[in-house]
Amino acid sequence: MKEIVLSVKELTVYRESYAAVQDVSFSLESGTDTSIVGPNGGGKTTLVQAILGILPRHSGEIFILGQPLTRKGFLPSRLRQQIAYLPQNFLVDRRIPMTVDELVGLGWDRLGFQLPWANRKKRDRAVRDALARVNGSHLRTKLIGGLSGGETKRMLLAYCLVYPRRLLILDEAPAGLDIRAESEFYQLLYQLKQEQNWAILQISHDLDMVRQHCDRVLCINRTLRCQGTPEVALSPDSLSALYGTEFARYHHSH
Ligand SMILES: Nc1ncnc2c1ncn2[C@@H]1O[C@H](COP(=O)(O)OP(=O)(O)OP(=O)(O)O)[C@@H](O)[C@H]1O
């Protein structure tokens, strides 16, 4: 059964004194893959960061699995754990002597107090399975500082998968993956959506991918210019309104 996983109502978010996202409303159902598209600086990342509670909102409301996200970005930990986020760039000090399985295991750990030895076997199995799903079993004992860009992506995806989630948010996730890894990546997203009923929200500039893989599209340029199926939201008229006439003509003529 479909369920509303995320609901955003009349959301406005400021970057300094500028409303980077203004009056945006939409909702996401479980078992669906939705893409956010729009020009550079259009507010896509700002929108996602507000949903994650990283950026404060100026006005509007955000509900995750029916629970409101507070103005300060607080969500009960049992709900926060249902959300996974794969950022565009992995910004940590890579000199930290941490192995891949240690990092992926952090995604499994419950937020809040727990005994370090509790559920050890279950945790180890979950880490192994998550790495296997992203074809990253061979990376298990590697230090995170020694990974290539594509391997880092796989590790982060395993971090997202290691625990059953309800909402997966991706910021240009396949960037840095080779052709085969990218295809496997979308296959995996499809499985998570179909078999696990996850709702997926992904920022993308790859309109061909969006047409091929996504069920719905949100066209953002500060405000929500259009939303609907890829056929509707990526029609020549919608693309002209979003990116300008020249782009729409070019994109449809090849
Ligand atoms: N840290 C920041 N401080 C101030 N303004 C910012 C900051 N980050 C982004 N902005 C501004 O907010 C607006 C929206 O930026 P945002 O990064 O959300 O757009 P985007 O659609 O994700 O862009 P891109 O496609 O280039 O990644 C832009 O005008 C940008 O200059």
Image: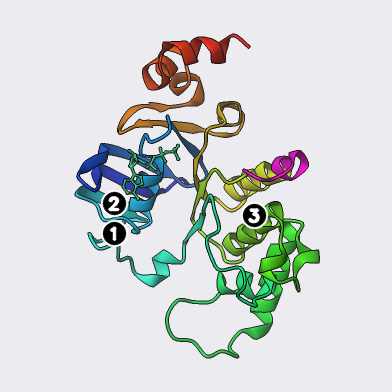
Q: Decide which of tag 1 and tag 3 comes sooner along the chain.
A: 1
Q: Amino acid at mark 2?
A: Ile
> Whole-percent x and y of residue 68?
27, 58
Residue 202 drawn above or below residue 135: above
- Please say whether residue 176 is one of the residues in the magenta stretch: yes
| Disc on the earlier residue, 3 or 2 | 2
Secondary structure under badge 3?
A: helix
Mark 3 residue crowding within 10 angstroms, few (<14) / some (14–19) / many (20+) = many
Question: Which comes before the other along the chain, label 2 or label 1?
Answer: 2
Question: Residue at label 3?
Answer: 153
| Residue 33 screen position, x and y as percent | 52, 40
Q: Where, by quadrant of the figure, is residue 24 drawn?
A: top left
As for residue 197 lying within the magenta part, the answer is no
Residue picked out by circle 2: 62
Report which quarter residue 20 is drawn in.
top left
Residue 230 point in image, percent of width and height:
50, 25
Q: Position of residue 167 (x, y in %)?
A: 48, 53
Q: Helix, strand or loop at disc 2? A: strand
Residue highlighted by disc 1: 69
Q: How many marks?
A: 3
Q: Which residues are magenta?
A: 175-183
Q: Are marks 1 and 3 in contact (CB under 8 Å)?
A: no
Q: Is residue 245 left or right of residue 67?
A: right
The mark closer to the camera, 1 or 3, is 3
